[in-house]
Image (cartoon, rainbow, N blue to C red):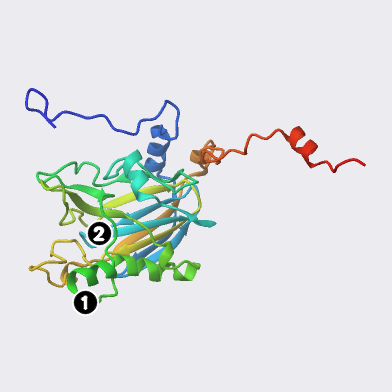
Amino acid sequence: MKDDSGMEARVAAAYQATEGSALTVDRDFYQRIAADSARTLLCRFVIPIRSGAAWVVPAGQVFRIIAVEGPQVGDLNLWNLHNPRERFWASRTRQLQRAHVSVHDRLWSTLPYLRPMATITADSLEDYGTDHEGGRVHDLLGTRCDPYVNRLLTGEDFDFHCHSNLVRAVLPYGLDERDVHDVLNVFQCTGLNADDQYFMKRCPAKTGDYLEFFAEVDLLCALSTCPGGDLSIPLWGPDATDPLPVCRPLGVEVYQPAPALLATWEPPASPAYRGRHGLRPPDVDWSARQREMKPPQG
C-alpha cells in the first residue's frame, strides 16, 4: 500500500498492548544478560549434519545456537520441561512480535499458558534487515520440512527432514511425533514474493554467527540441523538436487549468568483469565427449586 507520494505507507500493527503488559520488555535487563562477561559456560556440544539433539535449559540460564562451520539453517522447538503441553507457539509469536525475530523478541507458549518461554538476548545477524529481494532472517513464516510433504511433492520417501530429526531427538524425553510443532527457523532467510508465496534464500550466516536466548521457564529444547543445509540448492522442483554438499553442523552453548543479574528477575506468569470461555451456570432460583422438590404432605 502506498500513500499519495508513492511511498510505502506504514500500517499499524494489529496487536498492540497497554503499557506495562507482558509485551513491555525490560531491555536494560536483557542487555545486561547479553553483556555479562562473568557468565559461566555449563556445556557445549555440536549437532552433526542432518541430525537433531535435545537438551535442558533451566529458567534463568542462557543458550546460544552457533554456525560453527558456516551457513546452516536450524529448526528450533521448545517445551516446558515439566509440562510438554505448554510449548512454543510460532503463529502467536509471529503476531505478537514479528515474522522474523531478533533481539528483545520473545518466543510465546500455547494456550492456556500464553507466556514468554524465551527472550532473544543477542543476534549477530541483527543488522541484516531486509535484503533487496525482501528476505529477512530467523523465520517464523514457514515451518519445518517433513517427510509427508516430501512424499506429496516428489513421490519419494526420505527420513531425515527437520520434522524427523526433531522426532528422534525428543524420544528419549518421553515425547513423540505428536509433540513436535512449528519451529523457529534459525539463520533461515525467507520472505513473500510478488505473488504472496513463501520463498527461501541462501542462509547468510557465517562461521561464528549466533542467536542467543534467555530461558524464561525451565525448557526442553530441540534443534535440527536442516538436511537442506544452507538452502542454496533447490529442494523441490525441476532443479532439485541433493544438498548434502551444503550441509554443516551447528553448535550449542549453555551459560549460567552472574547470580547478581537475576536478583530481581522472576519467571513470567500466565494471563489471569478465569477460563470460563463464556460458559455460565443457568440462572436458577434454588429456593423455588427446593420447594418444588419437597415431597407432598399427608
- Residue 104: tell me if it is visible: no
Look at label 1 and name its amino acid: Glu
- Which dot marks residue 73? 2
Locate the C terminus by quadrant. top right
Helix, strand or loop under label 1: loop
Look at label 2 and name its amino acid: Val
- Which dot marks residue 156? 1
Disc with the residue nearer the chain's start (2 vs 1): 2
Task: Tell me residue 39's x, y (percent).
Answer: 44, 48
| 37 in relation to 65, above or below | above
**Does 289 sit left or right of 2 as displayed?**
right
Extreme residue toward the front, this view: 298
Task: Tell me residue 224's x, y (percent).
Answer: 32, 64
Considering depth in this image, is 125 or 90 the residue closer to the camera? Answer: 90
- For discs 2 and 1, the disc positioned in front in the rendered view: 1
Tell me the distance, in whole angstroms, between the alpha carbons under discs 2 and 1. 23 Å
- Which dot marks residue 49? none
**Residues packed near mark 1 inside 10 Å, few (<14), some (14 to 19) or many (20 plus):** few
Locate the N terminus by quadrant. top left
Q: Name which residue lies at 39% across and 30% down.
A: 17
Q: Name which residue lies at 41% across and 41% down.
A: 33
Extreme residue toward the top, this view: 4
| 143 in relation to 26, above or below | below
Task: Tell me residue 157's x, y (percent).
Answer: 25, 77
